[in-house]
Amino acid sequence: MMPKTNNESELVKKLTNKRYTITTAESCTGGLLSATLVNVSGASEVINCAFVTYANEAKEKFAGVQHETLLAHGAVSEETAAEMCRGCACLAQADMGLSTTGIAGPGGGTPDKPVGLVYIGCCLHDDVVVERHIFSGDRLQVRNQAVEAALDLAIRCLDKE
């Protein structure tokens, strides 16, 4: 497992200082990202809602992913991650949307999309950044690494603003 950082506290502090709100749309992390943020005292000031969009139908309904995107690129794709983070931010009227979609394993991988592949999207005021990662380890380790990478991406997006 990755060494635990304090990225969640740093992210909540930065959001609080800017008076920004955040929402999440999670697939492979299954709520672990929002649960990690909620561990921080004061998180209620910045988190307005969170979506676990495991099924494609949920990605469409709660994260604004276009059906055509899922057909053309699949649930685990840069395009889907981008639409998830933008869509959840729009739906929640949040300053930032953070998304995760990937293959945590141990099954489900293919040569093109191996186990451990995770796309993380961050939308800050309609500016979207998506990162592609391939993590190793068991299912929980992949999920934990995805959460840490998502927190790191959100912090970097805020710092660039």
Image (cartoon, rainbow, N blue to C red):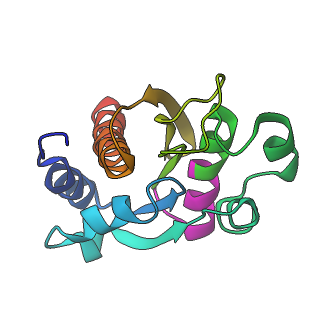
Horizontal side, residue 88 vs residue 75: left or right: left
Task: Work out whether residue 19 or residue 35 is closer to the camera in this orientation and state it.
Answer: 35
Residue occupying the point 81% across, 51% down: 66
Q: Which quadrant does the N terminus fall into?
A: top left
Q: Position of residue 93 (x, y in %)?
A: 55, 66
Residue 4 in the magenta stretch? The answer is no
Residue occupying the point 27% across, 56% down: 15
Q: Up-down: is 72 above or below 47?
A: above
Residue occupying the point 37% across, 49% down: 143
- Magenta residues, start to end: 85-95
Residue 92 in the magenta stretch? The answer is yes
Q: Position of residue 86 (x, y in %)?
A: 60, 49
In the image, farthest residue toward the top: 111
Residue occupying the point 30% across, 49% down: 144
The quarter of the displayed image where residue 20 is located: bottom left
Q: Position of residue 110 (x, y in %)?
A: 65, 30
